[in-house]
C-alpha cells in the first residue's frame, strides 16, 4: 500500500484547495449552470431559425434534451437508491460458509 | 503381390515359433519388431489395393471359394487390418516392460511370440472369408491374449487371464454353436456363399438361433455390457504393452466381426428389420456408456480407470451399430481407429508412468506432471480425445454418432452421448487434477520416461490429433466401407 | 505355493498304488502308438493331426500324473516341448511357404512336386498333419507343465 | 505465401503465441508488439474467400473475408495491439500467451465461413480467455474463472447443438443469415445471446471481468462480447425481437452501475449497457443501423479498453478499486486522469469524441424506422451512460474527496497504450469519415449538424448538472463496500441452497425410512452410490459364473426378441 498522508488532515472532506475539495465542487456547479444556460440560448437560436428537423415532434421542443437529461439522471439515481435497498448485501456475501 | 493376403497372416504365424526358437531376448525383439512393421506394410498395401472399391480374393490351397478357405479383403477389413497392424507395429517396440506388471526377463521371448500370434489371430479374423476359419483365428488370438495377460508378473495376472479364458471360452463356444446352426441350415461356411443362401432359410428358427448365439458369443469377446466383466482385470494386470495392444485392437476386431456378420452375412434388412437387433443393442449401448463411465469415475487405479472407460467407449461403437444406418455404422467404424489411437496412446502413457514409478495408482500420480511433462501432456490430449473435444479424433466419432442419432429421430440418444461425454470429462479430470494440482510425493521419479516408450506414445497421440483434423483416411474410408457393407458386398 | 504342495501330496499318494502304476506303465506305450495310428490314418479316414496330438499329449500327461512331473521332464524336457511346438507350427507354415515358392497358392500342395501333383498332395497333407500333430501334442504338454508347475517353477 | 493466405487472419497470432516460451527480454517485447502488426498485414492481403476444406464430409470455409468481418478485424487488431502494449511490462509469459491466443482466436472466428469453424474458435476464445482470469491466481479469481468457463463453454455447446439442428433442417452449415424461428436458429441465437450478455444471461460478465488481472480485463473487454455482436449482426440482422432485448440491456445495468462500488464492475455494467445499443442496431437491421452497430463496436472497443486500462492502472498502483476507497488520485496520476477523462467523454458521447459519431448512427436508424419507445429509452440510457461511466468513473477515482493516496504514475508502456487509445478516440471523433469508410455499408451521415450537437450538449450538460446537484445535496447514494445481488445469485446462492435443501430432504427421508416407500427410495439411492465404487457390483469384475449367467440371459432375451419379432411379422 503506497499510502501517504501528506495532505493528511484535510483528506476527509477536502476543505483545502484541491480539485477534490468542496469549494471546487461548488465552482463546478456554477460552471455547469452557466454552460447549461449557454446551450439553452443556442437552442433558442435554433428555434428562431427553424433549424431543427427531428424525426419526432418532441425533439423539436425547446429544451427537450436538457429536460430529458436532467430528469433521466434523477430517475436513475432514485432508482439506484431503491435498487440498493433491494439487492445490497455484505461485501463477503458469497464468501460466507 | 498376389500372395499379400495370406502373407499378412502367415508372416507373424511363422515368426512366432521362430521367436521361441531364437530365444535370445535382444534378437527376438529386433526380429519381432521387424515382422510387425512388415505386417503394417502389407496391410497398407492391401488397403491401397482395396481402395478402388472391389474385393481381393485369395483361395487357400488353390481350392475354389465355397469348398476351400477364402481370404477376402475389402475396404472394411483392410481398414481393420491397418488399425491392428499399425497398433502392433507401434506398441511392440516398447517391449514387455521392466517394472510393475512386467514380464520376467527370461520369458521375454514368449511375450514376443504370443504378441505376434495374437496379431496373426486378430488379423486372421478380419481377413478370412470363411466363418469357421473366423472361429479358429478368434481362438488363436484369444489363446495368445490369455498367455500375454498371464505373463504379467503378479499373481492377479494369472487369475485375470484364467477368468478371461473362462469367459472367452464361453464366448467361443457360443460362436461355434452359431456357426454349427448356420452350417446345418445352408451347408456352407463361406461367408459370401452364406449371404447368398441365407435369405431362402432366414425365416427358420435355427437361423434366428444362429444369429443370437453369434451375437452373444461375439458380445463376450467385444465386452458388450453386461458381458464386459473380464475386461477390467485383464487390462489392468497385463503388462503395459499388452494392455495397450489388446485395449486398442482385440475388442475392435470383435466389433468388426459383429458388423461383418450383421451387415455382410445376415443382411441389414434381416438383422435390423425382421429381428430388430437395434432394440436390443441400443439400451445395452446406453447402459455401457453410463455404467462404464460411472465406474471409471470411482476407480483408484489409472489402468482400471482406462479399462472401464473402454467399456464406455465400446458402448459408443455399439450405439453406432444399433441404428443400422450408414451414418451410425460410419461412426462405429471410425471409432475403431480413433479409439484405438486414443486408448492405445493412453495405455502407452501409463506404460511411461509405470516405467518410472512402478505403479499406476492415482494416488501415486500426484504432482507427476512436473516431472514427466510430455507423458502427462499426452494423457491430457488423450483424455480430451476420450471426452470427444473438437480437434481430437474422438470428436469425429462422436460427431457421426450424434448425427446418426439425430437422423434416426432420437435426439434424446444424441443428448445421452453428450451427457456421457460429460462423465468422461469427470474421470479425465480426476487424473489431470491429481497429476497437475497436487503436490508431488516424496518418491516421485527422477524424470521423463525413456524415449523407447515415449516416442510410440506420442506417435499414437499425435495421430489421434492429426486424424481429429484431417479425416479422409479415417472417416473417409469408414464411410466408404460402411456404404460397401450396407450395399451388401460381404 | 499351496498348488505345488497339493501336487506333491498327489504324487506321493500315487506311488502307493502299485496296480495303477503297473497298468499305466504297460498301457502308456499303446496310447502313444494309437496316437501315431490316428496321425497316419488321417490321410485315408477319420483322424488327423489334431486328434493324434491330443491323444499323444494325454499319454504324456497320464505319465506325469502317476510318476510325477519330474519323470515327465526327463522324457520331455520343457524346453524341448517348447521347441517342438514351435517346430510344428513352422512345419505347417513352412509347407505353405514352400507351395508359394513352388508357384501355387498358400497350401496348394500340388505345387510341391512339379512333375506329379498327386504326389505333392500326399506329401503336403502328410507334412501339414505332422506339423499340426506335433504342435498340439507339445502345446497340451506345455499347458500341463504350466499349471502343474506354477509356484514351484516360478 | 499462398498457404498462409488460405488461413484465416488471427491464426498468425495463435501460432506466434506458441513461440513465446522461446523468447526473452527485448526480443519478447518486440515480438509481442510485432505480432498484431504482422497479423494485420496478414488480414490486409487476405483473399475474399479461402478454399473450402473437407472435414469428414462437411465443407468448411475457414476464410471468408467480407466487409463485415474485415471491419471487425481492423478494430480487433487495433485492440490487440493496444492491449499488448498495455501489458508489455508484465513479467507473466502465460498472460502474454493467453492474450495473444485469445485475440487470435477471436479474430479467426470473425472469418469463419461456417458454423463448425465458428464453434471451434468460439470455444477457443473461451479457453484462452479464462487463463486471463486465472492468472490473477487468487481463490476468488479461480472460482469466478470457473463460472465464466462453464458459461462460455455452455454457449459453445448450445452453438454446436444449434448448428447440428440447423444442418439437419437445411443441409447447410454456412454461416449466413439464420432463422430465429427454427429450433436450430433459436439455439444459435441463445448461444450468441449468452456471449453477448443478453439480460438474465448477462451476469457472467460482471462476475468475471472484475476478477481478471489488470491487463487481462483489457483483453477481455475487447473481444468476447464483440465477437458475439459480430455473430449476431451476421446471423440475425433485422430480428425485431432484438430491439426490446437491446433496450433492456441498455437500461437495467445503469441502475446497478449507480450502486456498484467496484470500479471495474461498474465498467462491466457499462459494457453491458453499451452492448445494448449494438443489439438494438442489429434488431433495427437497416444498412444504416448495421453500419452504426459496427461503428459503435469499433469506437466502443477503444474507449472501453481505455477506461479499463485507466482503472487497471489505478488497481496496479493503489491495489484497490472500490469507489469508496479511492479519490484525489489526480494529483499522483495526472496522465492517467487525463486519459480516463477522454475515455469518459467518449463513452458519454460528447461531440468531437468517438462515442458521439457512432452512437448517433444507431439512434438515427432507430428513429428513421420509427421505433419510438426504443428511441426514447436509448435517450434516457444515454444520460445514464454519462452518469455511470462519464462522471462516476473519473470523479470517484480521481477527484471526489481526497483519500490521501499518493502513488506513482502508471508505468510508461501503460501510459503510451492509454495515450494511443485516447488519440484514437479523438481522431475518430474529429474525422468520422475515417471510420465510416471501413463500414460494411456505405454511410452518408453527417453527425455534426448544429441541432444534433446542441441537442447532445444539452442532454449531457443538464444531466451533469443534475448529478452535481444530487451529489451536493446528498441525495446521491453514498459509495459503500457491498455485494449487489444479480442473476448470478441464482447459481451462486439459490442453486447451492436448493442442493442443500435436497440433501436435507434426503436426510429427513432417511430418518422417515419407516414407511416402505421411503425405505425403497433410500435403498435405491444407496444402491446407486454403492454399485459403482470399486467394491460394488458394477465397479468390480464379477466371477466367470456371473458372466455366464448374463450371457445366458442375454441369449434368452435376444432369442425371445427375435422370435417375437418374426412371429409378429409372419
Image: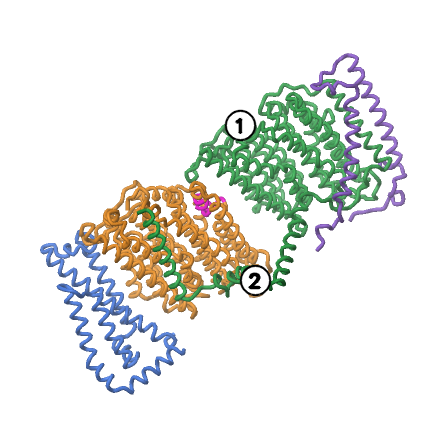
Among the 4 quarters of the image, the one containing residue D435:
top right
Q: Position of residue B159 (x, y in %)?
A: 40, 69
3D distance between C-alphas at marks 1 and 2: 68 Å
Q: What shade does chain A have?
A: purple
Q: Nearer the viewer, residue B114 or C6?
A: C6
Q: Position of residue C9 (x, y in %)?
A: 35, 83
Q: What shade does chain C have?
A: blue
Subunit of mark 2? D
- Local packing at callout 1 (Cα closer than 10 Å; few below 14, some 14-19, many 20+) is some
Q: Position of residue D75 (x, y in %)?
A: 61, 31
Q: What shade does chain B have?
A: orange
* Relative horizontal placement of residue A49, taking residue C141 as reference (left or right): right
Membership of D219 in magenta stretch: no
| Up-down relation of residue B188 to residue D105 (above or below) | below
Question: Looking at the image, which residue sits at the far left?
Answer: C115
Lower position in the chain sequence, tag 1 or tag 2? 1
Identify residue for label 2: D516
Element type at mark 1: loop
Identify residue for label 1: D66
What is the magenta range? Answer: B390-401
Tell me what residue is drawn at x 40 percent, y 50 percent: B279
Q: Nearer the viewer, residue B302 or C92?
A: B302
Q: Main secondary structure of the magenta part?
A: helix
Tell me what residue is drawn at x 87 percent, y 40 percent: A14
* Relative horizontal placement of residue B475, taking residue D384 as reference (left or right): left
| Up-down relation of residue B287 to residue D50 (above or below) | below
Question: Looking at the image, which residue sits at the far front?
Answer: D515
Element type at mark 2: helix
Q: Position of residue B340 (x, y in %)?
A: 41, 52
Amino acid at each position: 500500500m503506497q499510502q501517504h498522508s501528506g495532505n493528511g488532515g484535510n483528506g476527509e472532506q477536502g476543505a483545502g484547495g484541491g480539485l477534490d475539495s468542496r469549494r471546487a465542487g461548488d465552482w463546478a456547479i456554477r460552471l455547469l449552470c452557466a454552460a447549461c444556460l449557454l446551450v439553452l440560448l443556442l437552442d433558442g437560436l435554433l428555434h428562431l431559425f427553424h433549424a431543427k428537423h427531428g424525426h419526432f415532434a418532441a425533439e423539436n421542443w425547446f429544451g427537450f434534451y436538457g429536460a430529458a437529461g436532467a430528469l433521466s439522471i434523477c430517475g436513475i439515481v432514485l432508482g439506484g437508491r431503491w435498487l440498493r435497498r433491494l439487492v445490497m448485501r455484505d461485501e463477503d456475501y458469497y464468501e460466507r460458509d | 503381390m498376389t500372395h499379400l493376403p495370406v502373407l499378412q497372416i502367415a508372416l507373424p504365424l511363422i515368426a512366432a515359433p521362430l521367436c521361441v526358437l531364437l530365444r535370445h531376448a535382444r534378437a527376438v525383439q529386433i526380429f519381432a519388431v521387424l515382422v510387425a512393421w512388415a505386417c503394417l506394410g502389407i496391410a497398407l498395401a492391401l488397403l491401397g489395393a482395396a481402395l478402388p472399391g472391389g474385393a481381393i480374393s485369395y483361395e487357400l490351397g488353390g481350392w475354389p471359394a465355397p469348398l476351400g478357405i477364402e481370404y477376402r479383403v475389402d475396404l472394411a477389413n483392410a481398414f481393420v487390418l491397418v488399425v491392428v497392424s499399425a497398433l502392433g507395429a507401434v506398441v511392440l517396440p516398447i517391449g514387455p516392460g521392466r517394472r510393475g506388471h512386467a514380464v520376467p526377463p527370461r520369458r521375454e521371448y514368449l511375450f514376443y511370440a504370443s504378441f505376434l500370434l495374437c496379431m496373426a489371430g486378430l488379423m486372421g479374423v478380419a481377413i478370412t472369408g470363411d466363418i469357421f476359419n473366423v472361429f479358429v483365428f478368434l481362438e488363436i488370438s484369444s489363446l495368445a491374449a490369455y498367455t500375454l495377460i498371464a505373463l504379467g508378473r503378479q499373481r492377479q495376472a494369472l487369475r485375470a487371464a484364467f477368468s478371461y479364458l473362462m469367459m472367452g471360452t464361453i464366448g467361443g463356444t457360443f460362436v461355434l454353436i452359431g456357426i454349427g446352426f448356420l452350417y446345418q441350415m445352408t451347408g456352407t461356411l463361406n461367408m459370401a456363399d452364406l449371404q447368398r443362401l441365407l435369405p431362402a432359410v432366414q425365416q427358420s428358427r435355427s437361423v434366428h438361433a444362429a444369429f443370437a448365439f453369434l451375437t452373444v458369443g461375439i458380445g463376450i469377446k467385444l465386452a458388450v455390457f453386461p458381458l464386459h466383466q473380464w475386461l477390467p482385470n485383464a487390462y489392468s494386470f497385463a503388462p503395459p504393452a499388452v494392455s495397450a495392444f489388446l485395449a486398442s485392437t482385440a475388442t475392435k476386431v470383435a466389433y468388426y466381426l459383429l458388423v461383418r456378420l450383421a451387415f455382410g452375412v445376415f443382411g441389414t434388412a434381416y438383422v435390423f428389420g425382421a429381428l430388430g437387433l437395434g432394440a436390443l443393442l441400443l439400451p445395452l449401448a446406453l447402459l455401457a456408456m453410463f455404467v462404464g463411465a460411472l465406474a471409471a469415475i470411482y476407480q483408484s487405479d489409472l489402468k482400471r480407470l482406462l479399462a472401464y472407460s473402454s467399456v464406455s467407449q465400446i458402448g459408443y461403437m455399439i450405439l453406432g451399430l444399433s441404428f443400422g444406418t450408414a451414418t451410425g455404422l460410419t461412426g462405429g467404424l471410425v471409432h475403431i481407429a480413433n479409439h484405438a489411437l486414443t486408448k492405445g496412446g493412453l495405455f502407452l502413457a501409463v506404460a511411461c508412468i509405470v516405467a518410472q514409478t512402478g505403479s499406476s495408482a492415482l494416488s501415486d500420480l500426484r504432482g507427476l506432471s512436473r516431472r514427466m511433462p510430455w507423458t502427462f501432456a499426452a494423457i491430457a490430449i488423450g483424455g480430451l480425445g476420450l471426452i470427444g473435444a473438437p480437434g481430437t479424433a474422438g470428436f469425429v466419432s462422436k460427431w457421426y454418432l450424434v448425427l446418426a442419432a439425430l437422423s434416426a429421430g432420437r435426439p434424446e440418444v444424441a443428448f445421452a452421448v453428450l451427457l456421457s461425454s460429460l462423465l468422461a470429462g469427470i474421470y479425465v479430470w480426476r487424473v489431470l487434477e491429481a497429476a497437475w494440482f497436487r503436490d508431488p510425493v516424496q518418491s516421485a521419479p527422477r524424470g521423463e520416461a525413456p524415449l523407447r516408450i515415449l516416442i510410440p506414445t506420442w506417435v499414437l497421440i499425435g495421430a489421434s490429433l492429426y486424424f481429429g483434423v484431417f479425416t479422409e483416411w479415417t472417416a473417409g474410408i469408414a464411410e466408404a466401407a460402411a456404404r460397401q457393407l450396407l450395399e451388401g458386398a460381404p | 505355493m499351496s498348488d505345488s504342495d497339493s501336487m506333491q501330496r498327489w504324487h506321493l499318494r500315487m506311488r502307493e498304488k502299485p496296480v495303477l502304476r503297473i497298468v499305466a506303465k504297460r498301457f502308456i506305450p499303446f496310447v502313444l502308438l494309437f496316437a501315431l495310428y490316428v496321425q497316419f490314418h488321417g490321410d485315408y479316414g477319420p483322424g488327423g493331426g489334431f486328434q493324434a496330438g491330443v491323444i499323444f499329449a494325454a499319454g504324456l500327461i497320464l505319465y506325469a500324473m502317476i510318476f510325477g512331473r519330474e519323470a515327465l521332464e526327463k522324457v520331455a524336457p520343457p524346453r524341448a516341448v517348447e521347441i517342438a511346438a514351435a517346430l510344428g507350427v513352422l512345419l505347417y507354415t513352412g509347407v505353405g511357404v514352400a507351395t508359394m515358392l513352388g508357384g501355387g497358392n498358400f497350401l496348394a500342395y500340388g505345387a510341391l512336386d512339379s512333375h506329379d501333383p498327386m504326389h505333392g498332395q500326399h506329401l503336403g497333407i502328410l507334412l501339414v498333419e505332422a506339423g499340426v500333430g506335433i504342435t498340439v501334442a507339445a502345446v497340451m504338454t506345455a499347458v500341463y507343465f504350466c499349471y502343474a508347475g506354477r509356484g514351484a517353477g516360478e | 505465401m499462398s498457404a498462409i493466405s488460405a488461413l484465416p487472419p488471427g491464426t498468425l497470432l495463435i501460432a506466434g503465441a506458441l513461440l513465446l516460451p522461446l523468447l526473452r527480454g527485448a526480443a519478447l517485447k518486440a515480438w509481442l508488439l510485432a505480432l498484431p502488426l504482422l497479423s494485420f498485414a496478414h488480414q490486409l492481403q487476405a483473399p475474399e474467400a479461402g478454399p473450402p476444406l473437407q472435414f469428414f464430409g462437411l465443407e468448411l470455409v475457414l476464410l471468408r473475408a467480407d466487409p463485415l468481418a474485415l471491419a471487425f478485424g481492423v478494430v480487433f487488431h487495433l485492440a490487440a495491439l493496444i492491449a499488448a502494449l498495455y501489458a508489455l511490462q508484465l513479467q507473466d509469459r502465460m498472460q502474454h500467451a493467453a492474450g495473444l491466443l485469445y485475440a487470435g482466436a477471436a479474430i479467426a472466428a470473425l472469418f469463419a465461413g461456417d458454423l463448425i469453424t465458428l464453434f471451434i474458435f468460439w470455444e477457443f476464445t473461451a479457453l484462452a480467455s479464462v487463463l486471463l482470469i486465472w492468472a490473477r491466481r487468487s481463490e476468488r479469481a479461480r472460482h469466478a474463472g470457473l463460472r465464466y468457463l462453464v458459461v462460455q463453454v455452455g454457449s459453445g455447446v448450445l452453438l454446436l447443438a444449434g448448428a447440428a439442428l440447423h444442418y439437419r433442417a437445411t443441409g447447410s452449415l454456412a454461416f449466413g443469415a439464420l432463422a430465429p424461428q427454427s429450433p436450430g436458429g433459436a439455439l444459435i441465437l441463445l448461444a450468441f445471446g449468452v456471449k453477448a450478455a443478453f439480460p438474465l444471461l448477462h451476469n457472467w460478465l460482471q462476475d468475471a471481468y472484475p476478477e481478471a488481472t489488470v491487463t487481462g480485463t483489457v483483453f477481455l473487454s475487447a473481444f468476447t462480447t464483440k465477437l458475439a455482436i459480430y455473430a449476431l449482426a451476421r446471423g440475425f440482422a433485422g430480428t425485431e425481437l432484438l430491439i426490446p432485448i437491446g433496450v433492456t440491456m441498455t437500461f437495467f445495468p445503469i441502475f446497478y452501475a449507480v450502486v456498484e462500488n467496484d470500479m471495474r464492475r461498474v465498467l462491466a455494467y457499462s459494457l453491458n449497457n453499451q452492448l445494448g445499443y449494438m443489439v438494438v442496431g442489429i434488431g433495427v437491421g437497416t444498412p444504416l443501423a448495421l453500419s452504426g452497430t459496427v461503428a459503435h463496436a469499433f469506437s466502443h472497443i477503444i474507449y472501453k479498453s481505455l477506461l479499463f486500462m485507466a482503472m487497471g492502472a489505478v488497481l496496479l498502483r493503489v491495489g484497490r478499486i472500490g469507489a469508496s476507497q479511492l479519490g484525489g488520485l489526480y494529483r499522483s496520476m495526472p496522465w492517467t486522469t487525463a486519459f480516463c477523462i477522454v475515455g469518459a467523454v467518449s463513452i458519454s458521447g460528447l461531440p468531437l469524441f468517438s462515442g458521439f459519431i457512432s452512437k448517433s448512427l444507431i439512434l438515427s436508424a432507430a428513429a428513421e424506422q420509427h421505433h419510438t419507445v426504443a428511441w426514447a429509452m436509448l435517450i434516457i440510457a444515454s444520460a445514464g451512460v454519462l452518469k455511470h461511466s462519464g462522471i462516476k468513473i473519473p470523479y470517484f477515482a480521481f477527484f471526489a474527496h481526497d483519500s490521501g493516496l499518493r502513488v506513482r504514475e502508471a508505468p510508461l508502456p501503460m501510459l503510451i497504450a492509454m495515450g494511443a487509445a485516447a488519440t484514437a478516440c479523438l481522431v475518430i471523433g474529429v474525422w468520422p469519415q475515417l471510420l465510416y469508410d471501413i463500414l460494411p455499408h456505405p454511410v452518408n451521415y453527417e453527425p455534426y449538424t448544429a441541432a444534433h450537437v446542441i441537442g447532445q450538449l444539452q442532454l449531457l450538460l443538464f444531466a451533469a448538472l443534475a448529478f452535481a446537484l444530487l451529489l451536493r445535496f446528498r441525495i446521491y447514494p453514498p459509495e459503500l463496500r457491498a455485494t449487489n445481488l444479480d442473476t448470478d445469485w441464482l447459481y451462486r446462492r439459490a442453486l447451492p441452497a436448493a442442493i442443500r435443501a435436497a440433501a436435507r430432504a434426503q436426510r429427513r427421508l432417511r430418518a422417515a425410512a419407516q414407511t416402505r416407500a421411503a425405505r425403497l427410495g433410500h435403498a435405491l439411492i444407496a444402491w446407486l452410490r454403492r454399485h459403482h465404487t470399486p467394491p460394488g457390483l458394477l465397479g468390480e469384475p464379477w466371477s466367470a459364473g456371473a458372466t455366464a449367467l448374463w450371457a445366458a440371459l442375454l441369449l434368452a432375451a435376444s432369442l425371445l426378441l427375435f422370435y417375437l419379432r418374426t412371429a409378429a411379422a409372419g
